[in-house]
């Protein structure tokens, strides 16, 4: 069976619905499966949706609650990707599977991608197909940090080779699926850099119409065709990835990006307008403030970011425990070591007087260290701080 799938939490239901309806419009006979990374579906009726829903906890992963605790919402949604794909292969009789991020919108039939899976076990799309230039939104170095391939899309056919790759990828994601760029880790995505090293059966899709997104706009331009859209007047637009989009900003291409906007990229205006309209049609205003179940202990206290990472570091110690239980061992360990802190990581306002004052004090401490230590030892101090400022080192430093 051929199928498509996506993964999201309740707060992304409008994106899921927009994706599913766009996919079905062009691929009506293909089943869609959604992994819902939240605890229950009591408030939602999915009986009339064009997709089947599976709850993350029903993947039956060992120590799922510890996994759900140690990752934030983005990390958990991405870390479960290989596990979900394996589940669909093993439990839903899927033979060929296309995964899409929920913020993707489909503009054409995808038969050719399923055909590619007749010849190859894995399909990947690079972030870019040519070097960056003066108008590129991201420098080429960004893809060394975050991954060569964009895992908003991956295609797989069930083969012995795929099973072998999934075994490895799943282990890495469940153990090391964090956003930790300083340690060379970026969720599920960066691991895929190694796939072409591990297998000859990887098809790298160098098609401008696949996975068009803000990071490759410097090399791609849209034009209207009779039956859809063309990229660079050559390649049919198959799907666009509306990553990091603010639906409320009618001129914006991505959050916090001053330029280009749709004023500079008028070729994109029509598809962005259509996508925003679809999000609102599918409940964007209603779903935006839905509470994520795995953000809270059982007593309603929000979970802090450091607590997540430290529980992850002590994973083996807490096997079999429920870290969300406010009467349990994990909760007592977190609170006794003062690890919970502020639950929500807020973006630092570098322009505020308070922040500038704190930064000034830290800078002063470093200048004092330089004068005290001298050039060579100050350089060693910087190396030490770089090595030991990672989360993986904190259990030892904090003597947990």
Image (cartoon, helix red, strand yellow):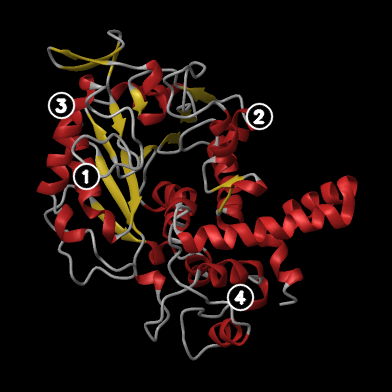
Task: Give the residue number, with chain letter if any, for mark 3.
Answer: 270
| Nearer to the camera, 27 or 137 | 137
Task: From this view, report whether residue 148 is shown above or below residue 58.
Answer: above
Question: Which residue is painted at 89% across and 46% down in the image?
Answer: 376
- The label number, if any, that marks residue 319 in the structure image: 4
Q: Position of residue 232 (x, y in %)?
A: 31, 11
The reply to whether callout 3 and callout 4 are in contact (CB within 8 Å) is no
Which of the two labelled residues, at mark 4 and mark 1, occupies the earlier sequence position?
A: 1
Instruction: Assign the C terminus to one quadrant of the image.
Output: bottom right
- The label number, if any, that marks residue 197 in the structure image: 2
Which of the two labelled residues, at mark 1 and mark 3, occupies the earlier sequence position?
A: 1
Task: Give the residue number, with chain letter if any, for mark 1.
Answer: 247
Q: Secondary structure at mark 2?
A: helix
Q: Position of residue 318 (x, y in %)?
A: 62, 77
The CA distance from mark 1 to mark 3 is 14 Å
Q: Secondary structure at mark 3?
A: helix
Q: Secondary structure at mark 1?
A: loop
Q: Position of residue 122 (x, y in %)?
A: 49, 31
Q: Secondary structure at mark 4?
A: loop
């Amino acid at each position: 069976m051929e199928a498509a799938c996506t993964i999201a939490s309740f707060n992304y239901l409008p994106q899921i619905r927009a994706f599913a309806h766009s996919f079905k419009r062009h691929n009506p006979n293909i089943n869609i499966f959604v992994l819902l990374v939240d605890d229950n579906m009591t408030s939602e009726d999915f009986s009339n949706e064009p997709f089947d829903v599976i709850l993350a906890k029903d993947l039956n992963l060992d120590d799922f609650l510890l996994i759900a605790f140690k990752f934030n919402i983005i990390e958990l949604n991405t870390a479960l990707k290989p596990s979900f794909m394996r589940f669909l292969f093993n439990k839903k009789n899927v033979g060929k599977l296309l995964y899409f991020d929920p913020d993707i919108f489909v503009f054409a039939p995808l038969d050719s991608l399923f055909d590619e899976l007749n010849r190859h076990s894995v399909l990947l799309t690079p972030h870019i197909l040519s070097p960056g230039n003066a108008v590129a939104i991201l420098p080429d170095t960004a893809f060394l940090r975050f991954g060569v391939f964009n895992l908003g899309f991956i295609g797989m056919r069930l083969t012995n080779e795929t099973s072998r790759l999934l075994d490895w990828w799943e282990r890495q994601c469940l153990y090391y699926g964090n956003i930790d760029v300083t340690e060379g880790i970026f969720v599920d995505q960066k691991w895929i850099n190694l796939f072409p090293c591990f297998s000859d059966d990887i098809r790298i899709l160098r098609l401008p119409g696949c996975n068009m997104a803000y990071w490759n706009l410097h090399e791609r331009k849209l034009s209207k065709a009779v039956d859809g859209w063309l990229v660079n007047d050559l390649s049919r637009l198959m799907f666009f990835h509306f990553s990091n989009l603010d639906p409320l900003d009618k001129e914006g291409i991505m959050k916090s990006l001053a330029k280009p906007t749709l004023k500079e990229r008028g070729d994109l205006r029509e598809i962005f307008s259509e996508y925003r309209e679809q999000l609102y049609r599918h409940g964007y205003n209603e779903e935006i403030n839905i509470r994520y179940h795995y953000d809270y202990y059982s007593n309603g206290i929000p979970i802090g970011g450091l607590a997540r990472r430290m529980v992850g570091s002590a994973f083996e110690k807490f096997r079999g425990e429920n870290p969300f239980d406010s009467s349990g061992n994990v909760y007592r360990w977190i609170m006794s070591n003062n690890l919970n802190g502020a639950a929500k990581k807020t973006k630092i306002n570098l322009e505020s007087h308070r922040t500038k004052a704190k930064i000034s004090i830290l800078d002063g401490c470093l200048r004092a260290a330089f004068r005290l230590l001298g050039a060579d030892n100050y350089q060693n101090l910087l190396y030490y701080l770089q090595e030991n400022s990672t989360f993986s080192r904190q259990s030892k430093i904090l003597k947990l």
